[in-house]
Image: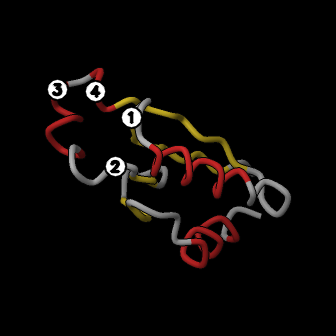
Amino acid sequence: MTCNLTFYGRTYCHLCDDMLAALESLRGEFIFEVAVVDVDTDSALEARYDELVPVLADEGGVELCHYFLDVPKVREYLARFQ
């Protein structure tokens, strides 16, 4: 079963690049899809996530982590789908 995650970030954000790279390192352990959303393309998302990006959310929109990948938390979440 594939897990779907949503990544909220910006194109010019080095923390966003770092979190995506850290998330990609988990692909060897887990099967998941990541929808990447640029918060600057939607004023509501920009208002909601402006200073928090990057943000990784689960399928229900619940925030798993922001700024840096919380590897233990994300690993625990992804393990439920294996």
Which is nearer the eye, 81 or 47? Answer: 47
State how far apart marks 4 and 3 are (Cα): 7 Å
Whole-number angstrom distance, CA of label 4 to CA of label 2:
11 Å
Taking the spot 41% from the left edge, 32% from the top edge, the residue there is: 12
**12 to the left or right of 5:** left
Q: Three-letter amino acid code at disc 2? A: Val
Q: Position of residue 65 (x, y in %)?
A: 42, 64
Q: Tag 4 or tag 1, which sits nearer the N-term?
A: 1
| Tag 4 residue | 40
Q: Which mark is residue 43?
A: 3
Q: Is residue 24 above or below residue 29?
A: above
Question: Mark 3 to mark 1: distance in Å?
Answer: 13 Å
Q: Nearer the viewer, mark 3 or mark 1?
A: 1
Observer-side mark, 4 or 3, equals 4
Give amino acid for label 1.
Arg
Report the residue marked by disc 1. 10
Q: Position of residue 67 (x, y in %)?
A: 39, 60
- Residue drawn at the location 36% of the way across and 58% of the way down: 62
Q: Is residue 5 above or below residue 45?
A: below
Q: Are the two marked residues, 1 and 2, in contact with CB atoms closer than 8 angstroms? A: yes
Quadrant, the C terminus:
bottom right
Q: Are marks 1 and 4 in contact (CB under 8 Å)?
A: yes
Number of the front mark, 2 or 3: 2
Badge 2 marks a residue whose secondary structure is loop
